Amino acid sequence: MVGTTTTFTDAIGKDDLDAAKEAYPAARLHYERIEPIAESFGDLDPLIDMRIDDATDGTDFTGFHALEQLLFEKKTLDGAPALAEQLNENVAELQTLIKDVDFTPLVMGNGAKSLLDEVAKSKVTGEEERYSRIDLVDFAGNVDGARYVYTALRPALLEKDAELVKTLDERFPALVDLLETHRAEEGDAGYVAGSPYVSYDDLSKDDVKALAVEVDAISEPLGQISGVVTK
């Protein structure tokens, strides 16, 4: 995450709007994989990931989405360098703090469920990346993070609840395979520079519904992980 964020902010520092826009999706992917951990550090997650709706009562709009708005909606880098510097500082602080986190099975299991809840709340709805429309990148990041946790805990789960493992072994590939049907390359309809997936705006209502159904199908069994591994 530090590396991809630096690539993103370096492009801003060089006043290269197109390069910054292209670097944005990779930085978002890495953040979305670890978001539940960032949320455990008080104001750090809002500083990195707040929406404009959160910038009320005198709160400054800052972080990834403030930069996203400048780049993709306003199509300018005016004011972006200061926001980029602040983002780098907050990401560096996260990197420092995360080294001292005790990643217990309970923390991991709850984090995996939180990631899939995020998918249902703001990725499938297209709410989060409202300027860039790269919501499927965030979707993939959340799924990657949840799948990583499941893979790490799978041996312990297998000993305690083989049926739950069987269910998740089926549901994760089904969700990933469906997401893969929305991949795009340069020249394809709906392509967004730097993103491996189509723009959210390119999805039909049926596409969104199908993704939501798969997320619902995996959310309930995934929510059982913490209880099983801590028995």
Image: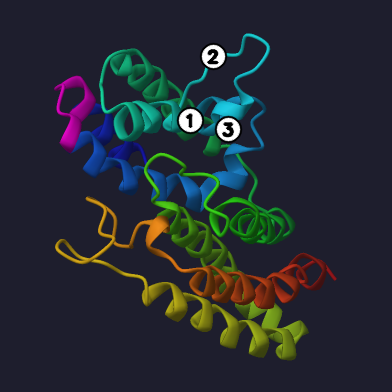
Q: Nearer the viewer, residue 181 or 85?
A: 181
Q: Judge the density around disc 1: few (<14), some (14-19), many (≥20) Cα neighbours within 10 Å.
A: few
Which amino acid type is marked by label 3? Asp
Q: Earlier in the sequence, mark 2 or mark 3?
A: 3
Q: Earlier in the sequence, mark 2 or mark 1?
A: 2
Q: Which mark is residue 217?
A: none
Q: Secondary structure at mark 1?
A: helix
- Farthest right residue? 231
Which amino acid type is marked by label 2? Asp
> Magenta-highlighted stretch: main secondary structure?
helix
Q: Earlier in the sequence, mark 1 or mark 3?
A: 3
- How much space separates mark 2 and mark 3, taking CA atoms? 14 Å
Q: Are marks 2 and 3 in contact (CB under 8 Å)?
A: no
Q: Are marks 2 and 1 in contact (CB under 8 Å)?
A: no
Q: Residue at x 48, y 26 (%)?
A: 93
Residue 204 drawn above or below residue 46: below
Q: Quadrant of residue 163?
A: bottom right
Give the mark toward the camera: 2 or 3.
2
Q: Nearer the viewer, residue 103 or 190?
A: 190
Instruction: Tell me the residue that label 1 is attached to.
Output: 96
Instruction: Tell me the residue that label 3 is attached to.
Output: 45
Q: Does the stretch in magenta take in 166?
A: no
Instruction: Tell me the residue that label 2 is attached to.
Output: 60
- How much space separates mark 2 and mark 1, taking CA atoms? 24 Å
Q: Secondary structure at mark 3?
A: helix
Q: Residue at x 62, y 53 (%)?
A: 118
